[in-house]
Amino acid sequence: MRENDELEGERLYSRLLKLLKSKGVGGATVLKAIIGYGTTGEYHYEGIEVLSYNLPVVVKFVEKEEKVNSLLEELTKYVEKGLITIERAQVWVSS
C-alpha cells in the first residue's frame, strides 16, 4: 500500500495497526520505503528532500499460523489495493 492510502479519513497503515492490536497480535511494524514501483511500473520517489511523499509502506507482524489465518478475511476487507503476503518465519531469540 502507499502511505497516503486512507480508510474513513485515517491512514490505512494506522488502521491496520489498531486492528492487529485489538485482535491480540503481540506486535506490528510499519516500514516506509525509500523508493519503489508497483504494477504500473511508475517509480514512487521524489528525492531525498521529500521522502514523505506517498511512498510505499509495509505493515509486518509475526504471529502463529492459526491466528494469521483467522485474521486474513478481515485484513482483506481493509486492503482493497495492495498485497497481503504470508511467509514462514523462524523466530530466533537472543540470550
Image (tube, helix red, strand yellow):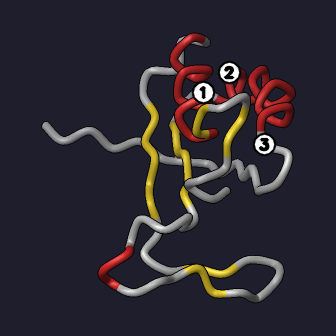
Q: Which residue is mark 3?
A: 79
Q: Amino acid at mark 1?
A: Lys
Answer with mark 3 or mark 1, whichever residue precedes in sequence.
1
Q: Nearer the viewer, residue 85 or 41?
A: 41
- Assign a secondary structure to mark 2: helix
The location of residue 4, given as percent across then percent down, is 59, 53
Which residue: 49% across, 68% down?
A: 53
Q: Considering only vertical position in the picture, is 13 above or below 22?
A: below
Residue type beneath disc 2: Lys
Disc 3 residue type (three-letter): Val
Q: Which residue is mark 1?
A: 64
- The residue at the point 76 percent across, 88 percent down is 41
Residue 32 in percent (x, y) is at 44, 60
Q: CA distance from mark 3 to mark 1?
A: 21 Å
Q: Quadrant of residue 71?
A: top right
Q: Quadrant of residue 95?
A: top left
Q: Can you tell which quarter of the image residue 52 is in?
A: bottom left
Identify the mark at residue 67; answer none if there is no mark: 2
